[in-house]
Image (tube, helix red, strand yellow):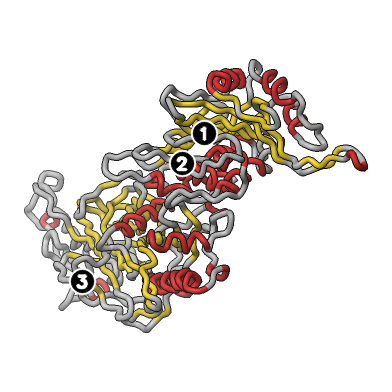
Amino acid sequence: MTVLVRESAQNSWDARLPGHTVDYRIDYQTVGAAHAPVWRDELLRDAPQTEHLPLRASLSASTIDILTISDRGTSGLGGPTRADSAVTQDHDFVSFVRNIGEPRDTAHGGGTYGFGKGIFYLIAKSGAVLVHTRCRVEGGFETRLIGCALWQSHVKGNGSKATRYTGRHWWGNRKADVVEPLTGPDAEMMAYRLGLRAFEADETGTSIVVIDPELGDREPHEATDYLADAILWNLWPKMLSVADERPPMTFSVRHQGSEVTVPDPRDTRPIDLFVEAYENMCSAEKGHVLESFNPRRVLGRLGLEKRPALPLEPTPAATGMGIEKTVHHVCLMRTAELVVTYHQGPKPAAEYLSYAGVFRVTEEMDATFASSEPPTHDAWAWQSLEGRDKTFVRVAFTRLKEKLDALVAINDKVRSPGAEVPLGAASREFSSLVTGSWGIGGGVRFGKPKVNPVAQNDDEDVEWEPERRDVFVAETLSPGSNPVPDTPAWDGGRYPGGDEVPDDRTGLRPDMPTQDARPGWDSLAGTLPAAPRPQPPAARPKVQYVAEPYYEIRDGNVVLVQEFRLPVPGTQQVSPQLAILLPGNGVREMDPPIGAARPEFFGWESERGLLDRTNDLVVSGGPGIWRLLVVPAPDTVTEIGVAVKRAEVAR
């Protein structure tokens, strides 16, 4: 079914009208009860027996299912209707209906009529299709309708009276020894009786109706979902519009009259990565020119895009294109900008890094690369060519390899204060030993506590310092002794210069008499307020990391999430502490060079999932979990941390 989408869309694109957007549409439907008798009466009349053509079995079933592939904004199948016509131009009808394997003569075309037509018969379990087209003729427009079947050849009769039949059959208007299409009002009336979609008065195009389509092991609704996804993966360049202009082609899929969504390439992972690569290719600043040096030729332009991305769950259509959980591919296309294939490049060392590329050949090289394609137009095989053409295609793959190797190249070690530790898969295995660092260029950084990474205030604490706690000791006294207030104690609870600790409210030791015990004094207990108990020194704010950083999607972005708590009560201010370690030297860059990739603060997320984009956020300490969200920088080791200090609160 992927081949059906590719070949039929190529034919539609080749038949486009200048200045028009091609409307490409696929409909799966069951013929209604009002129209089914017409299908059986008209198509089974004089039809071959089932052993020679399965059409009778398909139309005799309880329901008649059809798959219609149509286009509008195209020229339709014009020209003469007989193959023996001497017309050398504008012979689309003959090329499509009568002749198999005749190449298209359209400039920058995508395919040939032979294989493009053959796929319709290959997926028809009945062996038969209807061709319904409208084209311009001298004096106006003409509608044409003809039925065609292609099956195995067979012999009827015996001995000298035996006759061989080609397996090709037509339904239409029989004139002498040729079956011509119904035309004009006759074609329009028959199309109406069959329930086919009509053309507007000034509309041209073609509809191919496949009778009893082969869906494999898919249910009809699964098949239409697959077709919509196949359109995305094979035809996304035609969905892109420039400025306010309409895209070159529009696409729609329907199942029993209901719309099936064709995904938008700009909003669908991972096709959006290829869209960015395409735009880079078109950019004079970001695109790369690939050349052959001997002989010297410009082969085409290449655009590349790389970014962090979560692993994929590829769809069946994506899997069919060779896409796995990580994208590391280049979309190959000729000047028609129809996807040829997705060329697989080297995998990045980092599991959560993907890249995409788009390579488009020049107009001068288009015919060379077209000649390297098989009939399905889904590969460039330089081995099948000779001479310079072979050299050009082979060198194109060599240049692609050079660019991709440079794109994913990264020094496999990075200096840390402790030791040099290999990055990549090994570092991920040991990631549980590290807190607060993450590497998109290969792994995480093993590091010691930071030593003055940035200037800090005395009341400020950052995540990579070892956590310190102020300890307050309360001594337990023996029975019968006077109680000691819950205050800080030093030297095991003994006051310097004496054996007993004075009461901080009176300044007296326990063995000294109080006012209540002095002769001549009345007790004032309960009438005077007690002196306030002194509070211990306020604990410094701390950051307590909950787990290793992990990935999630937020608003379509891959973000690195670091969970943490603020265990010390009180109002505090938290700030993101982000830095990168450059590949090869391990130097921390707090302020990367202009234009260099850098990690980006995304926001703070509370335990309830509320997102706050304030860079310096004032919060209250407690047991709740907060999350710091960061968009990491590709090709670097991203250091992620949280700085905390006491917040100044207005009284």
Please determine whether, in this image, residue 115 is positioned above or below residue 77.
below
Of the image marks 3 and 2, the number of the one nearer the N terminus: 2
Disc 1: which residue: 206
Mark 2 → mark 1, Cα distance in angstroms: 10 Å
Which quarter of the image is occupied by the N terminus? Answer: top right
Residue 429 relative to residue 1: left or right: left
Mark 3 → mark 2, Cα distance in angstroms: 104 Å
Dot 3, crowdedness within 10 Å: few (<14), some or many (≥20)?
A: some
Please determine whether, in this image, residue 546 is positioned above or below residue 215.
below
Residue 64 lies, in percent from the top left, at: 68, 27
The quadrant in which residue 358 appears is bottom left
Residue 401 lies, in percent from the top left, at: 44, 72
Which residue corresponds to the image point at 47% horizontal and 64% vertical from the top-left?
A: 368
Which element is circle 3 on? loop
Mark 2 near mark 1, Cβ–Cβ under 8 Å?
yes
Q: Residue furthest left?
A: 520
Identity, as a three-letter code, of the amino acid under mark 2: Ala
Dot 1, crowdedness within 10 Å: few (<14), some or many (≥20)?
A: many
Q: Residue furthest front?
A: 86
Identity, as a three-letter code, of the amino acid under mark 1: Thr
Of the image marks 3 and 1, the number of the one nearer the N terminus: 1
Disc 3: which residue: 500
Residue 127 relative to residue 296: left or right: right
Disc 2: which residue: 15
Q: Residue furthest bottom?
A: 419
